Image: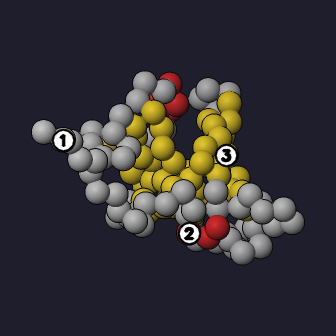
Amino acid sequence: MARTAPLRNPSDSPAPAGGYVSVELPIRSMGAVYQSRLWNVALKGLCLVVKDGSSIISHLHVGDVLTARYRTGMPGHPETIADTRIRHITHETTGRFKGHHLVGLSIIDGADTATGAIH
């Protein structure tokens, strides 16, 4: 019997809302900056994807607020630095992100995502 791949939600995209393609999160407890591609995952919003077993996951907690640096990947467009709250950390056991954690991010009000200015 042939196996079929699970249907992919067409709204799962590596091109998240706001045009951001990557984020840098300072992880003080590690003394490091974590850089990741961003995903706009249906029903879960703006996320970064962390592989199971990564040491970073034990340093991230729901409710943490980090000063993140967002990049669009387009020359001439300024990066955005904004306070960002971790909304959820979801372990995926099926589908496209099986074997990973989706870490949901939310830019806190007061960040002007068009200009990168913080109010």
> Residue at 23% across / 47% down in the picture?
4
Q: CA distance from mark 2 to mark 3?
A: 17 Å
Q: CA distance from mark 1 to mark 2?
A: 36 Å
Q: Are marks 1 and 2 in contact (CB under 8 Å)?
A: no
Q: Earlier in the sequence, mark 1 or mark 2?
A: 1
Q: Amino acid at mark 3?
A: Glu
Judge the density around disc 3: few (<14), some (14-19), many (≥20) Cα neighbours within 10 Å. Answer: some
**Above or below, 91 relative to 19:** above
Disc assigned to residue 2: 1
**Figure coloring:** secondary structure
Q: Earlier in the sequence, mark 2 or mark 3?
A: 2
Q: Describe residue 74's horizontal placement relative to residue 20 as left or right.
A: right
Q: Amino acid at mark 1?
A: Ala
Q: Earlier in the sequence, mark 1 or mark 3?
A: 1
Q: Amino acid at mark 2?
A: Ala
The secondary structure type at the circle numbered 3 is: strand
Q: CA distance from mark 1 to mark 3?
A: 41 Å
Q: Position of residue 98 (x, y in %)?
A: 33, 39
Judge the density around disc 2: few (<14), some (14-19), many (≥20) Cα neighbours within 10 Å. Answer: few
Disc assigned to residue 17: 2
**Above or below, 17 relative to 87:** below
Disc assigned to residue 24: 3
Q: Position of residue 96 (x, y in %)?
A: 36, 47
Q: Nearer the viewer, mark 1 or mark 2?
A: 1
**Above or below, 46 relative to 55:** below
The secondary structure type at the circle numbered 2 is: helix
